[in-house]
Amino acid sequence: MFRRIDVIGSGRVGSAVSGRLRQRAVDLDSSDPELVLLCVPDAAIAEVAAALPLGPWIAHVSGATPLAALEPHARRFGMHPLQTFTRSRGPEQLDGAWAAVTAETEDAQAAGVWLAETLGLRPFTLDESARTLYHAGAVFVSNYLVTLHRAATLLFESAGAPPAALEPLMLRTIENDFELTGPISRGDWPTVAAHRGAIRDAKPELEQLYDVLADATLELVT
């Protein structure tokens, strides 16, 4: 669909996207692009878009930013790769991930789907009005997973256990389709109470987090 794409931004997402487009023999042309793809920080999208000449399609890869940030451009869409990226890896980070496509016209939807599939992503349609809720869900499963791992690491370190042992447990939980096991799943409240006491003694700053997660697990999963 697009033979010439100008990717603006060379951060973690922009680098992976540019690398994949090169693999797909797309010309990353900044002089006469058919699509301008903004891979810049969310706060910069509106300013960058407003400074670009009208004509080519324009899109951003933000999960939370509304399409209105791309004004005054009319031919526009959003394509958010639902993945976490690091500079130490390349375009393979895109493989198999999903992508939220938000568009206002059928042509824009088709353009977003084409871009996602060209990048090796699995596109799905996301309504503009649902963008913030969707992004909050992504933050729960990605960003807060990092927080949980850090909290567990602190407890393991205090117990003299190797934090590296946590990773296989995390991976198997995913492989087991997130089936809940452990004391809450079997109603073992004395063990839960013992956890609270041990955390209070060793890492009191984590007690509230444990309580919130225990209550949420009881309400949402069991």
Image (tube, helix red, strand yellow):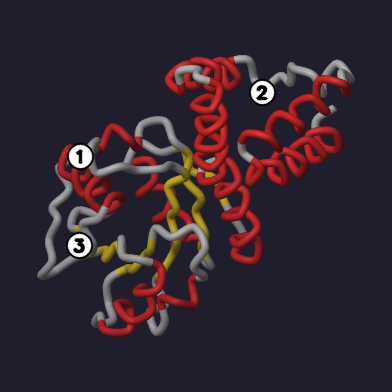
Counting residues from the start of the chain, the first of labels 2 and 1 encountered is 1
Tell me where residue 7 sits by quadrant: bottom left
For label 1, count other residues whose C-alpha is less than 10 Å away and answer few (under 14), some (14-19) or many (20+).
few
Residue drawn at x 61%, y 62% is: 132
Q: Which residue is mark 2?
A: 178
Tell me where residue 50 sits by quadrant: bottom left
Nearer mark to the viewer, of 2 and 1: 2
Q: Which three-letter amino acid code belongs to the residue tagged 2?
A: Phe
Q: Which residue is mark 3?
A: 6
Provide residue 161's location: percent of width, then percent of height: 50, 17
Provide residue 87's location: percent of width, then percent of height: 24, 44
Q: Which mark is residue 147?
A: none
Report the side of 112 relative to 204 (left or right). Answer: left
Q: Secondary structure at mark 1?
A: loop
Q: Secondary structure at mark 2?
A: loop
Counting residues from the start of the chain, the first of labels 3 and 1 encountered is 3
Q: Nearer the viewer, residue 120 or 152?
A: 152
